[in-house]
Amino acid sequence: MNFQEIRNSLSDGLLSFPITDMDADGNFDKDSYNERLKWFISYEISTVFVAGGTGEFFSLSQQEYRQIVQSATQIVDGKMPVISSVGRSIPAAIELARIAEEAGIDGLLLMPPYLTGCPPEGAVAYAKAIINSTKLPVIYYNRSNGILSAPHIQELADACPNLIGLKDGTGNMQDLNDIIKTVGDRLVYIGGVPTAEIISEAYLSIGVNTYSSAVFNFVPDLAIHYYKALRAGNKAVVEQILKEFFIPFVRLRSKKKGYAVSLIKAGAEWIGRGAGDVRPPLIMPTPAESKHLKGLIDRVAGLLQ
């Protein structure tokens, strides 16, 4: 796909990140993952992000990453763009970008620098080195150790012609609005805080039309129904789903660090599409927390009427 086709897909429609399947021994389960991808693209989504945060990018080996991007491009087969993550050190990110290119991936999501705190000038240099190493279109993930303000995002956009988007992982509407008004339509803007639905109304109000939905992994019909109601301005439906599902889910998610991923895997298990447990250092929810999640899932049918 060309840059404009990818931009169009990122600008309108629900985006989602499949979880990464692990077997009982904690090893990547390619066959199960392939079935998950087929299930994903049977729904009305516009872009698939593989090996993302929800997909435990931070815990994958290079060989597992290679298998994931190869599977994704083969199964999606041009039906929609496939974006994969890159990051960690500069050499590691460049190598992952090369692997993604060889597999036929359509674009890359650049994760923030790993662990160490750094000044914004350093984060800019990190991003430039990686973005300019590849011909693929890149989305910058503005989150964690790599949070940049409007002038630095503008600098990246000016220096990197293949930078096509910014994914917000901060939820800071003041700073995000500054970036959007400063950089303008040079970039596509994507909502990317954990459980982005919780601030989707605020995102939409400043021109962020899309976001990545992690809960799509276990309540896909609800995720799509909510997104359509949001874009249609159906406030009654949006409010009901937020009150009865997303707000309780976020409260549950907030009980422990890493639950933004762990609860998604627990939810997939409840609907019969289990993907194994998360890898350490993340942990799975307690039985009581998992049962609470099941109660939220049981509400979904009533919310779709």
Image (spheres, rainbow, N blue to C red):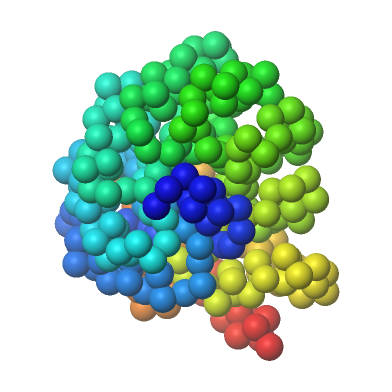
**277 vs 232: above or below:** above
In the image: residue 215, left or right of residue 181: left
**185 vs 268: above or below:** above
**35 vs 123: above or below:** below
Question: Quick check: can you spot residue 20?
Answer: yes
| Image label count | 0
Q: Residue at x 37, y 74 (%)?
A: 39
Q: Nearer the viewer, residue 286 or 148?
A: 148
Image quadrant occupied by the C terminus: bottom right
Query: Residue 290, percent across and down?
Result: 48, 66
Q: Residue at x 72, y 71 (%)?
A: 229
Q: Nearer the viewer, residue 22 or 48?
A: 48
Question: Quick check: can you spot residue 280?
Answer: no
Query: Residue 273, percent across and down?
Result: 35, 73
Q: Residue at x 23, y 48 (%)?
A: 103
Query: Residue 133, percent across and down?
Result: 34, 25
In the image: residue 214, left or right of residue 266: right
Q: Quadrant of residue 53?
A: top left
Query: Residue 285, percent across and down?
Result: 45, 58
In the image: residue 1, left or right of residue 27: right
In the image: residue 9, left or right of residue 64: right
Q: Nearer the viewer, residue 21 or 290?
A: 21
Q: Nearer the viewer, residue 88 or 103?
A: 103
Q: Residue at x 53, y 56 (%)?
A: 9
